[in-house]
Amino acid sequence: MDLSRFTAQHPPPAPPPCTRLRWRNSALHSSAIENHTEIQGKSLTVTRTSGEQFAELIKTPRADNAVLHGPRCPAVRGTLCLTGHHLIFSSRRKEGGEELWLLHANIDCVEKRFVGSLGTIVIKCKDLRIIQLDIPGMEECLNIASSIEALSTLDSITLMYPFFYRPMFEVVEDGWRSYLPEQEFELLSSVTDEWRLSCANKDFSVCPTYPPVVIIPKCIDDEALRKVAVFRYGGRFPVLSYYHKKNGMVMMRSSQPLTGTNGRRCKEDEKLINATLRPGKRGYIIDTRSLNVAQQARAKGGGFEQEVYYPQWRRIHKCIERFNILQESLIKLVEACNDQSHNMDRWLSKLEASNWLTHIKEILTAACLAAQCIDREGASVLVHGSDGTDSTLQVTSLAQIILDPRCRTIRGFEALVVREWLQAGHPFQLRCAQSAYSNTKQKWEAPVFLLFLDCVWQILRQFPCSFEFNEQFLIMLFEHAYASQFGTFLGNNENERSKLKLTQKTMSLWSWVNRSEELARFKNPLFEANSLVIWPSVAPQSLQLWEGVFLRWNRPSKFLDEAQEEVLNIINYNRELQAKVNALRRQLAELETDDRMQENLTDSTPVRAPWLRGSVDLNENPLLPS
């Protein structure tokens, strides 16, 4: 059995010399500074620190003669071992032995079944894989199942693996300092001087979910900013999201204004967003709620910008669903993808009932609208919903991918994720606490970031040559958002990350991704830099199910891998031929240059009779008359 199909977070990148490992998603896998333990006569690594700290939670640390089952693979017998942060399964093969490492944080649901004295544990993961373990002995099975449940539902963030993880690769870049607001502002200030950095939120007192430093219009002082923050829900005042170099138009984002039923206004808020308008120009406010929902929010103290106070702005409502509706959609979609009935009508019915592609269409439509207002209408845009932490960020980030070729590069996309998701306060800890399998009651979980990545994949599929990164890069980000050895996606905002001291105590994902050996795996071989705006189709016929995420554990990947390898071979061969063509062209150009120089020399030399070129011996030239 090839365990590489089940490879889970996060085994060592360089396995112990006496262990043979085969990984499918090695991009996610690294190890901490660890002790060695013997399992099946092999040297396996088990985290010492976490093992001691969580010893009371591990009732049965090891089970021999366990059997691992997985979709489309035969069963394999081996030894199961539990550590503080990993479930490790080692096959019993002496030659070519394989191991499965599964990070406890990646476990979404644990189910138990018993047949006589044989117990079965079904583990459903946040990355959508399902594995089954047969454990001999009812008590042993119960102990292991309860241990896995306890270790996969730790309450404290500081007990999670990123705080124990130590990289075994050379760290050449501090990912925590790769995409600071000051660096983004430096790029902005090279093309315009109408904006400034504000440190009014340096202690997170103005807005607890914003970063300490934000970019705002230069004409707005910090005192006015504080008044605007009081007028906006959660203190999320309008900040710069994107500056369009082509025409100087901008996109800002915020939360809803607290107008309430009495029509409250804030002149500082009006001045702030009007500062983004050019003389005689109008702007657009894209509200990601339906008009009905926005009016209901107004009755509860929230609301929307009133035309009488914002006469230069036109408000457009583009409804994007939130929270429990999106989570239910993901659950239904995954259930449809796992349906093995092979009934076409049933599959299509379940796929449609999930409404997943409908949500994709709604988000892309709103993003295209924002991009169209900026690029084609020459108007600035303000985007907000209610909180400004979910659908707002989907729209602003996707609009930038459409408009800005930099966001379609690897580092540009990383900067986008940091700026528009992490620093902007998307609550990753809440949204990604559960995936599609959890049985616990839903609270704040929602696949908001996964929907964003799915939308990016839809655009990538329509413009396969315009992106520097490939599909695996997006899948990697999805997996790390839900479970990771890195601290990048921990916490709900910069305020929480600061209190957790993540920059000092954990490793950044970007420190690992941006190593040359890793970047090579995430680069799109078809990429050709495209400086143009790209306009994706949002027609239903243009949107497809993201099989790379939702069907990857249910289908064989052999033929897809072979096809991808063949594509790479063709591309490399084409590059070799192109290099030869270029070399021949250079040679031809050099020969043509030499010929022209020779012709010029010939033309510039005067023709003289032989007897005029110095002395001539008449006896040596028989053609001359004697």
Image (cartoon, helix red, strand yellow):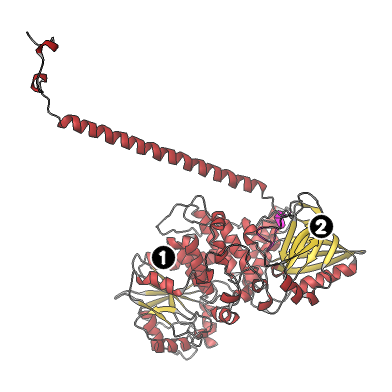
Query: Which image quadrant for residue 329?
Result: bottom right
The residue that mark 2 highlights is: 41
The residue that mark 1 highlights is: 372
Left or right, residue 303 beside residue 499: left
Q: Position of residue 563 (x, y in %)?
A: 60, 45
Q: Is residue 28 visible?
A: yes
Type of amino acid under label 1:
Gln
Q: Residue at x 83, y 66 (%)?
A: 62
Q: Is residue 322 above or below residue 91?
A: below
Helix or strand or loop: what does disc 2 sit on? loop
Span highlighted in magenta in the image: 3-14
Query: Which image quadrant for residue 603?
Result: top left
Q: Residue at x 39, y 36 (%)?
A: 584
Query: Which image quadrant for residue 521?
Result: bottom right
Specify the principal SS of the magenta part: loop
- Most extreme residue toward the right is 116
Q: In terms of depth relative to the viewer, which is nearer, 243 or 16?
A: 16
Type of amino acid under label 2:
Gly
Is 302 a magenta residue? no
Q: Position of residue 89 (x, y in %)?
A: 78, 60
**Mark 1 crowd level (few <14, some 14–19, many ≥20, 10 Å Cα):** some
